Amino acid sequence: MVPLPAQGHLNQLLHLARLISSYGIPVHFVGTTTHNRQAKLRIHGWDPLATTNIHFHEFPTPSFPSLPPDPNASFPSHMVPLLKASMNLREPVGTLLRTLSAATKRVIVIHDSLMASVVQDVPSIPSAESYCFRSISAFATSLFRFARRKTFPIDAEILKEAPSIESCSTSEFWEFRRTQLEHRIFNSGNLCNTSRVIEDRYIDMLAQEQVDGTSKHWAIGPFNPVDLLKNKNSIRRHSCLEWLDKQNKRNEEEDFTSGERKQNRSILL
């Protein structure tokens, strides 16, 4: 597992690591000391230290300026120095992969979509192959894919209301993203933290367009367990579920007016 060193990305691949390890498959989780510690401390629903076949590897990166978040700046401007520093993980990750390849029949690398440059040596390593993990929804991936063309095969009206993709972040971040795109041509497939029940048509759209040079797209989620046990003697629902329980139930009649369905929007995170 080669996650992007940002909590939302670390968290998802750590949950995936748990699922894979439950089949008796050893998992190697790559990161820095700070970010591996962050991922383990903030996880919920299970204890990563209790899972003996998840192995954490901590590699150093060059020092970089740690900028304070600016709520008025384009996201994620304060993280760009960290993203650039993470590209230096290529050498230690390559060394780890060659070591694993020499001791096992097959090595599968699952990397964040923004860490492709770190695993660019996979094609040269015997019995190794890589899969790109997408931490955002298939819908969001599709929107990124087609917004630049000003076309969208499904729900074209969305483009009229969606903000400019370019305005969502800084030019530095887009340059970093383009760098990662160049190294995704050797992907064996793409893994999406979503469900076909929710995003079937968008997953099929990505497959038809052969995003990242492959038509292999798997919906393998969502996986994000919550800890239901508050103490040994009672079982309570997680606080987020308790909050949802208190919300007013939507009346189905609210969705329809004079036979016409109102527009309902949702965001997949």
Image (cartoon, grey):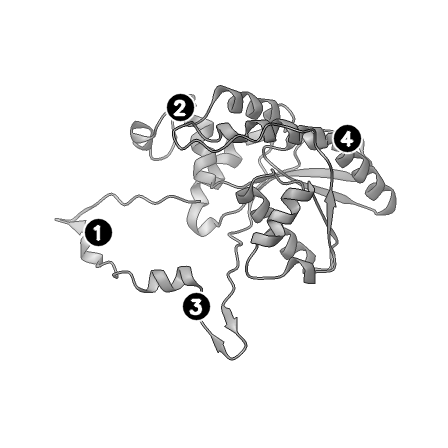
Q: Earlier in the sequence, mark 3 or mark 2?
A: 2
| Label 4 – label 3 distance at C-alpha | 44 Å
| Label 2 – label 1 distance at C-alpha | 33 Å
Tell me the residue at 38%/29% (across/down): 72
Q: Secondary structure at mark 1?
A: helix
Q: Is residue 257 left or right of residue 1?
A: left
Q: Earlier in the sequence, mark 4 or mark 2?
A: 4
Name the outermost residue toward the left: 258
Q: Secondary structure at mark 2?
A: helix
| Label 4 – label 2 distance at C-alpha | 33 Å
Q: Earlier in the sequence, mark 4 or mark 1?
A: 4
- Nearer-the-camera pick, 30 or 260: 30
Percent across and percent down for residue 266 are 34, 45
User: Residue at label 3?
Assistant: 237
| Label 4 – label 1 distance at C-alpha | 54 Å
Callout 1–callout 3 Cβ contact below 8 Å: no
- Nearer-the-camera pick, 120 or 63: 63
Residue depth check, mark 1 versus mark 3: number of the one nearer the observer: 3
Quadrant location, the C terminus: top left
Q: Secondary structure at mark 4?
A: helix
- The answer to whether residue 210 is seen in the rendering is no
Tag 4: residue type? Glu
Percent across and percent down for residue 254 are 19, 53
User: Residue at label 2?
Assistant: 167
Q: Quadrant of residue 96?
A: top right
Q: 10 Å neighbourhood of mark 4: few (<14), some, or many (≥20)?
A: some
Callout 4–callout 3 Cβ contact below 8 Å: no
Percent across and percent down for residue 232 are 54, 77
Q: Is residue 96 left or right of residue 160?
A: right
User: Residue at label 4?
Assistant: 91
User: Residue at label 1?
Assistant: 255
Q: Earlier in the sequence, mark 1 or mark 3?
A: 3
